[in-house]
Image (cartoon, rainbow, N blue to C red):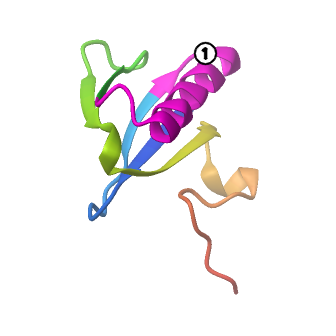
Amino acid sequence: MFIIDVTLKNTPVALSVQRKSADDAKALYRQILDAMQAGSPKILELTCEQQVGKTVGILVGEISAVQMSEKSSTAAASGRPPGFFALAE
């Protein structure tokens, strides 16, 4: 399972949707990046493959970042902390 997190300007919580395959996740990631660059469409509607019925509409001009990651059973086991930033020890 792959997670695509979208961070909005002035919003501390990321919006996320999930895709079952790496190809689908990469395609959605690319779609969001392309929308950010072009500013079109104005609103991007995303659905989640994990939670049936979960749909989110995002104003493209408010997107500040997008991240794609692979969901693992334990975040600590992968050695990668969740989120965009990691604190140095």
Classify the position of the C terminus by image quarter: bottom right
Residue 31 in magenta stretch = yes
Q: Residue at x 43, y 15 (%)?
A: 49
Does residue 1 show up? no
Does residue 49 show up? yes
Tell which of 49 and 33 is nearer to you: 33
Amino acid under label 1? Asp
Q: Which residues are magenta?
A: 18-42
Residue 8 lies left or right of residue 87; in this view the side is: left
Element under disc 1: helix
Residue 30 in magenta stretch = yes
Q: Is residue 50 above or below residue 81?
A: above
Q: Residue at x 40, y 38 (%)?
A: 16
Residue 73 lies left or right of residue 80; in this view the side is: left
Q: Count up the numbered dots.
A: 1
Tell which of 48 and 61 is nearer to you: 61
Residue 71: % across, % down: 60, 36
Q: Circle 1 sits on which residue?
A: 24
Residue 50 lies left or right of residue 79; in this view the side is: left
Residue 43: % across, % down: 27, 29
- Secondary structure mostly seen in the magenta stretch: helix
Residue 33 lies left or right of residue 22; in this view the side is: left
Quadrant of residue 59 in the image?
A: top left
Q: Residue at x 33, y 45 (%)?
A: 61
Tell which of 76 and 25 is nearer to you: 25
